[in-house]
Amino acid sequence: MINAPPPPPVFWPALPALLATLPPFTIPVVWTGERPSCPHVYIGAAPRLPARRSAATLGPHGLALHLAPGDEGHALALIAAFLAPETTPAATAPASRALLALAARVAPRDVSVLIEGATGTGKEGLARLIHQLSPRRDASLVAVNCAALPEAMLEATLFGHERGAFTGAVAAGRGLFREADGGTLFLDEVAELPLPLQAKLLRALQEREVMPVGATRPVKVDVRLIAAGNRDLAADVACGRFRADLYYRLAVFPLRTLPLAERIEDLPAIAAALLLRRAREARHGTATVPTGWLPPSTGAALLAHPWPGNVRERGNVLDRALVMAAGTTIDTHDLTFDTPFQPRNALPRPLQHPPHNPALTGAVRAQEERSIACALAEAPPRRAAAARLGISERTLRYKMAGIASRSPGFPREMRLQ
């Protein structure tokens, strides 16, 4: 039986046209699935009786808005957040809408997807959208951050293990590949995988089978892989930190998320979605809860901020503002940014450090190579050498790969094993 495909993503700019076709101040919406059968958006304060200060409340029957003159912008954003499926990222900027359109296009195709972009730009949200729009949406989406797992446990975590395969393995483990069987496996920070494990991941993708630790026979799996990273994987391939064959296997369909500063038009929609989500989290049973409100002055201050921390910084700022606000309206004095405020159109500050010196860089690099060579000579096991240098074994391996690529004639012990 083939399930009907889900509806395409709802794009926010369609809201003004939608409102123009409906009776004033009442917008009926019909939902299916787990949502209420007939929630409504109620817009109060007709022109003959305007509200002095805007407010929004979320209850069991829908979203109620009381508007003051000039507050239509945030009201539209809240309505759009209420209407849109929770798995659809907010997208107003043309570049963001184009990215969502590409994600919707690749979702039905059972190919690997590589999502690259800076931290906090919504890579996992994009992966969840692809899974939700794919034929695998009824199965599990298993997400894991490769950088957060101990290196010694990565193989067993991904591929599983047999009972007694290693100390402490008192029972067999299925591993994330088998947990995601029939669904999607999302590997975040895939660049942090060690080179030996990259080879095993490549085989799992090519053969569609995994070899659990301690097993003698491979196990077939049916998994779609979506990988993500905040580093340039192509540059890692050039430096020897990432396998070229695995890169091309992952990047069948590459996508790149943009920093919030490059799609600032998305900010009102993203802010409204977060405020509505916080109201949903606070609501229990049939209770009615207020939703945070952004007046035009606060919206202008948010638009002027450069947002170096991207969407995560935005979440921090709004969560703090909800705590500091006297009521439900967030004023400009309630905003506390993670970094010193600087308007996006301000002139850059002068450099506080001397200009780049190629000779000095070369000397520092040569000293680093000598230090690593001495540590390896005095403490041959790589782990002991890393401890002597005060760095992790993984960092040492990356540095050794870079040295070997720059200096083909370097001593043999500097090469990757």
Image (cartoon, rainbow, N blue to C red):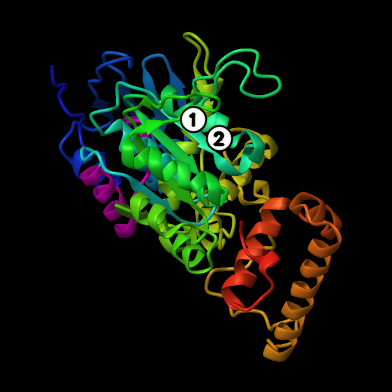
Q: Is residue 60 above or below residue 181?
A: above
Q: Residue at x 74, y 80 (%)?
A: 366
- What's the residue type where badge 1 is placed? Phe
Q: Which mark is residue 155?
A: 2
Asked whether residue 45 is in view, the answer is no
- Left or right side of 209 for 278: right
Start-end of magenta stretch: 78-106
| Amino acid type at mark 2 | Glu
Q: Nearer the viewer, residue 45 or 188?
A: 188
Q: Main secondary structure of the magenta part?
A: helix
**Which mark, by number, is residue 159?**
1
Nearer to us in this view, 89 or 207: 207
Q: How dense is the environment of label 1, judged by Cα within 10 Å: few (below 14), some, or many (20 and up)?
A: many
Whether the magenta-drawn stretch holds residue 82 is answered as yes
Q: Position of residue 41 (x, y in %)?
A: 32, 26
Image marks 1 and 2: residues in contact by CB distance under 8 Å: yes
